[in-house]
Image: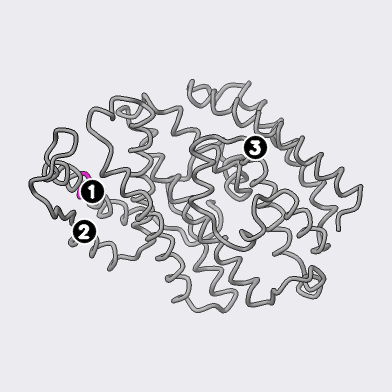
Amino acid sequence: MLSEKDKINLRELININIKIKDIYDSIREMEEEFTTESNLFKSKLNILKKLIIAENKIYEGFKNYPEKIIAAYNEISFSRASLFEMNVLNELDDVANDYSENLIRTRIANHFLNLFLSSDESCMSLANIPFDIDGKAYSQIEICIQIDYVNTILTILNTYLNDKKYNNIRNLLFKIKDNYAFLHEEIELDFLEHNFQINPDLNWKAKIYSDIAGLDEWEVDQIEEGLGNEVFDEKIDDIITIEEEELEDNEVFFQYTLAQILIRSAMLFLGEENAHYLQNNFKLNVYNEKCVVEGEKLTDLAARGQARINKVLAMYDEDKKLPIIYGARRS
């Protein structure tokens, strides 16, 4: 149960995070305006660092009290069922749509989850939930994989930010970048150390952690593959179904571009054999060649969709050449 003091601290966390989100929004505006080398930008980063220090002082009061951490998590999180589970696609929806309240609550929930998983096992039993040392290691692996995937999204997204073809949606791409940093403490710290610049290399740590925790690497591969398939299955429709003239709209073009980024990232998590299988075998089938949809032959729609898919799948050949650094942070 949360004491009255705990509830006050939780409300203060929300207030601090509202301020942090406001700073993030102003940082994004400055990134869009190419003013990240200005004194004002540095001043914003210093304010952000001070707010994070204040935030962490409150979390310290919950540290090693797992029953309080879980109670606070349940108070702030949207779903108790989400505890210890990856929520990549739910998170993406909030990130892409900039749902501030959801982002703030998820950021706090993520902090509490990390606090719980860093608790001593002898204390964790006090939380009165079915959770053992193996469960702790497995949950930490899932968090590592989620961070690895987000880092992959950001590295690939960076190529779009540096391409003039995407200038019209640059503000929307920065929204993805900064909202992911807002949600994940590890990415946030990395950005603060590097003036909010995206790492050009891929930093993956799940395999490193699995070695330390004594988990089978095969299990990590299976979780990564499952994540890759989930994202691919969910986002491939955005590549296929968007009509050509709709791409003139910036919001639609952004959704199409984001789907490309997500699928490219997912392909790297499928493993080379599975990725090549998709490249060679993903085919759109038309069962009624006489069918017409809104004045366009279904065969023509399928051909256009297949060409788009092939284009995205072919990008894997370049993406797999990205430098992968097996470590938690860039140097």
The magenta region covers 308-312
The residue beneath circle 3 is 101
Tell me where residue 193 appears, x and y as whole percent.
60, 42
CB atoms of marks 3 and 1 within 8 Å: no
Spatial CA distance of label 2 from label 1 is 8 Å
Residue 27: which quarter of the image? Answer: top right
Q: Are marks 2 and 1 in contact (CB under 8 Å)?
A: yes
Q: Amino acid at mark 3?
A: Glu
Please give the name of the residue rendered at 83% of the width and 62% of the height, measured from the top-left corner.
65
**Mark 3, residues whose alpha carbon is within 10 Å: few (<14), some, or many (≥20)?**
some
Q: Is residue 244 left or right of residue 45?
A: left
Q: Is residue 117 magenta?
A: no
The amino acid type of the residue labelled 2 equals Phe
Disc nearest the viewer among 3 and 1 = 3
Task: State the SS at label 1.
Answer: helix
Q: Amino acid at mark 1?
A: Ile
Q: Which residue is mark 1?
A: 309
**CA gap, disc 2 to disc 3?**
39 Å
Judging by the rendered image, the residue that carries numbered circle 2 is: 282
Q: Position of residue 204 (x, y in %)?
A: 48, 59
Judging from the image, the colouring scheme is one colour
Residue in front for this viewpoint, 123 or 75: 75
In the foreground, 84 or 328: 84
Mark found first going from the N terminus, 2 or 1: 2
